[in-house]
Image: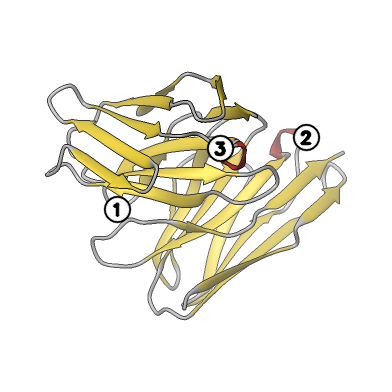
C-alpha cells in the first residue's frame, strides 16, 4: 500500500515563480520527512528535511511546511530557476523511508 | 567524507541470465544499507535493507535477493532475470542509530531483453 501520496504528478512554472508540491502520509509513527531532488539518469540527492517538532524549515529558496495534525507536508520552491527543473520526491519514515511517486518540475525561462 | 559507489552504471541482460549489482560505501562504519528500484516515471520502491553483516530484510517478495558480505558492501542478485526486473536500481546508505537521511548512489539502469 502507498504510505506517502504526492501531488501533482508534474508542474510547469515560469522562471521566478513559486513551485508547490504536496505530500500526505498515513503512519503517525513517521518522524522524519525529507525531500529529494533527482536529475535524469542520476540518483536522488537530499534537498531538505524536517522533523515533526517544527512546522516550517527554510533553506535558501526551499521551504518545507509541516502540518502534523493533518499528516501533510509540502515543499515550496521560491524564485524558481531553470536549474531547478528536476523530479522531486517526498519521503517519510522512521528507520526506513517510504517515498512518494514524484513530481516532475519544469521551469520555463 | 562519505561516498557511495555503485556499478555498473548501465547493464543489458537477456531474460534468464543471472544478475549481480554491487554497492560499496566509504568513510563510515556500520551503515544501514538499502536497495531501491525505480520504475520509469514512478517513485522509489524499497527492495531490501540491512542493518549489519549478514542481516537482510526483504520488503517485496520477488525474483531478487541481497547479501551483505562485508560491513560496507551490499550486493543485489538474481539467478534468472525476468523482463519485469528492468528498471533503475539505487543503492543507499544511512547512519545508525536513529537518523534516516538516506544518501543514494548514482544508480544502475538495468534493461532485460
Relative to B7, does residue B90 appear above or below in the rendering?
Answer: above
Is the residue at mark 2 from the same chain as the one at mark 3?
no
Is A106 rendered above or below residue B7?
Answer: above
- As drawn, B18 above or below B32: above
| Residue situated in front as seen by the camera: A81 or A40 | A81
Foreground tag (2 vs 3) = 3
Q: Do pointers 1 and 2 mark residues of a single chain?
A: no
Residue at horizontal 67 percent and vertical 44 percent from the top? B88
Q: Please state the chain letter of the residue tagged with numbered disc 1 in the rendered image.
A: A
Tags 1 and 3 on a common chain: yes
Residue bearing the label numbered 2:
B83
Q: Which mark identifies residue A95?
A: 1
Instruction: Give SS at disc 2.
Output: helix
Please tell me how many numbered marks the rendered image carries: 3
Q: Are marks 2 and 3 in contact (CB under 8 Å)?
A: no
Rendering coords of residue A30 (x, y %): 23, 40
Report how far apart the C-alphas of labels 1 and 2 lie in the structure: 31 Å
Protein chain holding label 3: A
Whichever of labels 1 and 3 marks the residue nearer the N terminus, that label is: 3
The answer to whether residue A19 is left or right of residue A67 is: right
Q: Secondary structure at mark 1?
A: loop
**Residue at the spot of label 3:** A81
Instruction: Please state the horizontal and vertical placement of residue B99, each as a whole percent of the image.
Output: 28, 60
The chain containing the residue under callout 2 comes to: B
Amino acid at each position: 500500500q502507498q504510505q506517502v501520496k504526492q501531488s501533482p504528478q508534474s508542474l510547469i512554472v515560469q522562471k521566478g515563480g513559486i513551485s508547490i508540491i504536496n505530500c500526505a502520509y498515513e503512519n503517525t509513527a513517521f518522524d522524519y520527512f525529507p525531500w529529494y531532488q533527482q536529475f535524469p539518469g542520476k540518483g536522488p540527492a537530499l534537498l531538505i528535511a524536517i522533523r515533526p517538532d517544527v512546522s516550517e524549515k527554510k533553506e535558501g529558496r526551499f521551504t518545507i511546511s509541516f502540518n502534523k495534525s493533518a499528516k501533510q507536508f509540502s515543499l515550496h520552491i521560491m524564485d524558481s530557476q531553470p536549474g531547478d527543473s528536476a523530479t522531486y520526491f517526498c519521503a517519510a519514515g522512521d528507520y526506513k523511508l517510504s517515498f512518494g511517486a514524484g513530481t516532475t518540475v519544469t521551469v520555463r525561462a | 567524507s562519505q561516498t557511495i559507489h555503485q556499478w555498473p552504471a548501465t547493464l543489458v541482460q537477456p531474460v534468464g541470465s543471472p544478475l549481480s549489482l554491487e554497492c560499496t560505501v566509504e568513510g563510515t562504519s556500520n551503515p544501514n544499507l538499502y536497495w531501491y528500484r525505480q520504475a520509469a516515471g514512478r517513485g522509489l520502491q524499497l527492495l531490501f535493507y540491512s542493518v549489519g553483516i549478514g542481516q537482510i530484510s526483504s520488503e517485496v517478495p520477488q525474483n531478487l535477493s541481497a547479501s551483505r558480505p562485508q560491513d560496507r558492501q551490499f550486493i543485489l542478485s538474481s539467478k534468472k532475470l525476468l523482463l519485469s526486473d528492468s528498471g533503475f536500481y539505487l543503492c543507499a546508505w544511512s547512519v545508525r542509530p536513529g537518523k534516516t537521511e538516506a544518501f543514494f548512489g548514482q544508480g544502475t539502469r538495468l534493461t532485460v531483453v
